[in-house]
Image (spheres, rainbow, N blue to C red):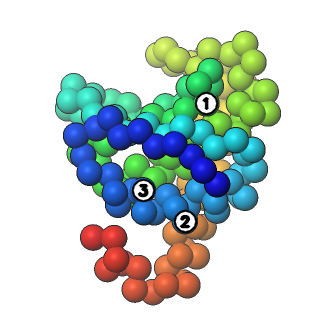
């Protein structure tokens, strides 16, 4: 699967790109999305200093995932990608037609969007966990390769 990665951050993301070579085909098969989203890695100093800042978001109009990288562990960023891939699949299936997924409390105010968030947390995290566990079982030395 071909997908575009834009590194607009101040960080070397080669560790993430290496993991994504294995994770993205796994996620596409597991989640079932048809088109690969664009992946954007971003730096934002103010966001990074905010303990409740954004970790990432999905843009349905551009079919893109943005992940904030400053001060984050690669595994945490991969979980963010997995979460946003569920939103990408939801978008492909028409779940966001006419819905606005931004603003304070959108997932608390709108039952449909709340259910979309629940699905993304559950399925995204489980997809990532299943990929990680499978990788570690098939390649026990993987811990030392991506340091």
> Does the image show residue 87?
yes
Image quarter of residue 92: top right
Helix, strand or loop at label 2? It is helix
The structure residue drawn at horizontal position 60% and vertical position 67%, both measured from the top left corner, is: 130
From mark 3 to mark 1, how far is it between C-alphas?
Answer: 19 Å
Q: Of label 3 and label 1, which has the lower sequence position?
A: 3
What residue is shown with label 3? 17
Image quarter of residue 68: top left
Q: Of label 2 and label 1, which has the lower sequence position?
A: 2
Mark 2 and 1 residues: CB-CB less than 8 Å, in contact? no
The correct choice, above or below, for 31 with respect to 139 in the image is above
Helix, strand or loop at label 3? It is helix
Helix, strand or loop at label 1? It is loop
Name the quarter where the N terminus is drawn: bottom right
Q: Position of residue 139 (x, y in %)?
A: 49, 84
Decide if residue 20 is on the left or right side of residue 44. right
Mark 3 neighbour density, 10 Å: few (under 14) some (14–19) many (20 or more): few
The correct choice, above or below, for 77 with respect to 61 in the image is below
What residue is shown with label 2? 22
> Does the image show residue 124?
no
The structure residue drawn at horizontal position 75% and vertical position 50%, both measured from the top left corner, is: 32
From mark 2 to mark 1, how far is it between C-alphas?
Answer: 21 Å
Mark 3 and 2 residues: CB-CB less than 8 Å, in contact? no
What residue is shown with label 1? 63
Mark 2 neighbour density, 10 Å: few (under 14) some (14–19) many (20 or more): few
Image quarter of residue 30: bottom right
Name the quarter where the C terminus is drawn: bottom left
How many marks the image carries: the answer is 3
């Amino acid at each position: 699967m071909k997908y575009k990665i834009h590194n607009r951050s101040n960080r070397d993301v080669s560790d993430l790109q290496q993991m994504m070579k294995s994770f993205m085909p796994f996620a596409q098969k597991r989640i079932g999305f048809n088109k690969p989203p664009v992946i954007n890695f971003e730096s934002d100093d103010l966001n990074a200093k905010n303990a409740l800042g954004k970790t990432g978001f999905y843009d349905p109009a551009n079919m893109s995932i943005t992940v904030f990288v400053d001060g984050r562990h690669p595994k945490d960023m991969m979980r963010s990608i997995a979460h946003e891939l569920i939103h990408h699949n939801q978008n492909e299936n028409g779940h966001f037609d006419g819905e606005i997924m931004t603003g304070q409390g959108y997932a608390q105010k709108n039952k449909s969007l709340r259910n979309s968030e629940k699905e993304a947390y559950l399925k995204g995290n489980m997809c990532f966990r299943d990929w990680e566990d499978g990788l570690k079982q098939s390649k026990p030395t993987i811990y030392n390769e991506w340091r």
